[in-house]
Amino acid sequence: MEFIDTHAHIYVEDFKEDLAQVISDSKATGLRRIYMPNIDVDSIDAMMDVHRQYPDFCIPMMGLHPTDVKEDFESQLAIMYEWLKKFPFAAVGEIGTDLYWDKTALDRQIEALKIQIGWAKEFDLPIAIHCRDSFKETVAVVEELQDGNLKGVFHCFSGSVEDAERAIAAGMMLGIGGVSTFKNGGMDKLLPHLTCEHLLLETDAPYLAPVPHRGKRNQPHYVSLVAQRIADLQQISVVEVAKITTQNALNLFKG
């Protein structure tokens, strides 16, 4: 079996001391590739350094995380746009909105999101969307700007069946991670109603580790636990989950 982790921040400090072992463990568990979403301007160098160390395995995206859309976001975006012009990133991400940490910055976040969706169209790239406590606000922007060419994924999706149908109708995939294994995560009510053709596997490492590692540092090779959870809830084989979601990732992302 081969898996792809479509969302992992393995360039952050949490992996500084044992990155080589984390990569080795990932490959030993059947991981074929790790896609790395960017956070802000300050995270670019670390992310690109990991990519240079593992160029065919750790693939970077470029974007401004919504919780880092501050008053200076236009200057940050200007730097990121220059990067997009000179390097073949896999996607524009991690972009979106977030009403969990700050409910006062939504207008600014939506402005930044619209700009970055424009980049995705310009460079023919998918988008990786963050929408914590803000799915309806975010999917409305995607629907508004969908011109038939926009594609991407709602990262860490944990909404309702109706939310999933709306995201899929808007041309998006659904990123499924460790929350799917949580007892009260709600995914047992969602995943049986979906098919793997719309799903991607992810970890969001180092965050949101799946059971039985919940509360510890998440790692890319735990993506196999997410795959098993999907298989259990959909009553299909984990081999089928791996096969379909891996192909979905290869079809969606560049590089």
Image (cartoon, rainbow, N blue to C red):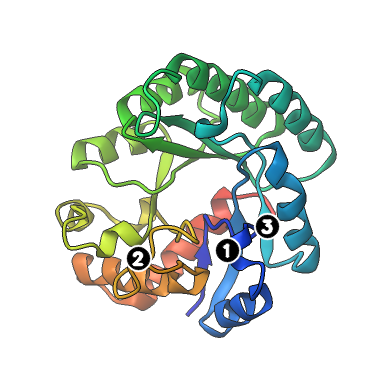
In terms of sequence position, does the residue under pointer 1 or pointer 2 come before the other?
A: 1
Residue in the image at 50% along x and 40% along y: 152
Q: Is residue 125 above or below residue 176?
A: above
Q: In the rendered view, does 217 fall on the left or right side of 61?
A: left
Report helix, strand or loop for mark 1. Answer: helix
- Of residues 118 and 209, the one nearer the viewer is 209
Look at the picture and state if 88 lies above or below 79: below
Q: CA distance from mark 1 to mark 2?
A: 14 Å
| Residue 135: mark in rendering | none
Check residue 215 in the rendering and tell me which mark sits there, or answer none. 2
Q: Position of residue 244 (x, y in %)?
A: 42, 64
Q: Amino acid at mark 3?
A: Ile
Distance of label 1 from label 3 (alpha carbons): 18 Å
Give percent across and percent down for residue 238.
Answer: 34, 76
Residue 10 image position (x, y, % from top left): 60, 61
Which residue is painted at 35% across and 38% down in the image? 168
On the image, numbered disc 1 is attached to which residue?
14
Q: In which quarter of the view is residue 81 placed?
A: top right
The alpha-carbon separation of the residues under discs 2 and 3 comes to: 26 Å
Q: Nearer the viewer, residue 114 or 78?
A: 78
Q: Quadrant of residue 33?
A: bottom right
- According to the picture, the residue beneath numbered tag 3 turns out to be 59
Which residue is at the far right? Answer: 86
Name the residue rendered at 63%, 60% in the picture. 13
Whether the residues at callouts 1 and 2 have beta carbons within 8 Å, the answer is no
Q: Secondary structure at mark 3?
A: strand
